[in-house]
Amino acid sequence: MAVTIPIDAAPVPSPDAADLAGPPQRFHAVVDRHFDAVAGFLARRVGPDTAEDLAQEVFVTAFRKRGKFDARYESARPWLLGIATRAVASHRRAERRQLQLYQRVVNEGAPAEHVRADFDPDLFAGLTALARRDRDAFLLHVWGDLAYEDVAHALDIPLGTVRSRIHRARRQLTAHLGGAR
């Protein structure tokens, strides 16, 4: 028995698109699906203490702008991580204070209990030396675990630009770290 599939059938919206387009009460489903990924990405960018506050800001912004989500995309994750990246950018002043504190720890030394166990001063210095645009694309790919296409969507830039930025960031980090990583 042959199955007929109508050619002009409307595409079935993704769960995220349906929840974002639906009544406001359905937005919690988007939060439930993506909060951990957004908070995890933010924690790597600004630290766990600030990440939760910024994650809440991201979802407030997403709720307000939910009508602008492009329903052609399966997942809201790249869109949300794009909002998260912009939230980090607007949070730069506080981030700069944190980076200055880390730099002081590196330059002046500090008791071991005051330094995060996973803090790598060489990697930190390499990341801060990158241009902001290159660093954002690189960290969305590496820490945000996004494919190049999703990074392009999150940052609203062409795929070729994403490839160039990530390649440049990798090359500069490798040079900074002496090719050891």
Image (tube, rainbow, N blue to C red):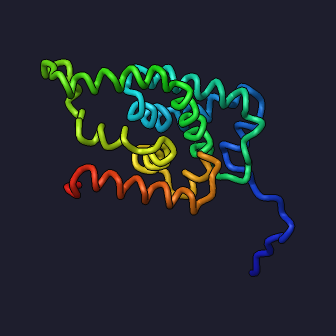
Identify which residue, 90 or 17, lies in the foreground. Answer: 90
- Residue at (31% x, 43% y) in the render: 126
- Residue at (43% x, 59% y) in the render: 167
Quadrant housing the C terminus: bottom left
Identify which residue, 167 or 139, lies in the foreground. Answer: 167
Question: Is 158 above or below relative to 53?
Answer: below
Question: Is 145 above or below relative to 57?
Answer: below
Quadrant housing the N terminus: bottom right
Question: Is 24 above or below relative to 160?
Answer: above
- 5 with respect to 16 (left or right): right
Task: Give coordinates of residue 85: x percent, y percent.
Answer: 54, 36
Task: Give coordinates of residue 124: x percent, y percent.
Answer: 30, 37
Task: Give coordinates of residue 36: x percent, y percent.
Answer: 46, 34
- 170 with respect to 134 (left or right): left
Farthest residue toward the left? 111
Q: Quadrant of residue 100?
A: top left
Question: Is 58 above or below relative to 68?
Answer: above
Q: Quadrant of residue 15?
A: top right
How many discs mark residues in the rendered view? Answer: 0
Task: Give coordinates of residue 24: x percent, y percent.
Answer: 74, 26
- Residue at (58% x, 46% y) in the render: 78
- 17 with respect to 118 (left or right): right
- 175 with respect to 15 (left or right): left
Identify which residue, 143 or 177, lies in the foreground. Answer: 177
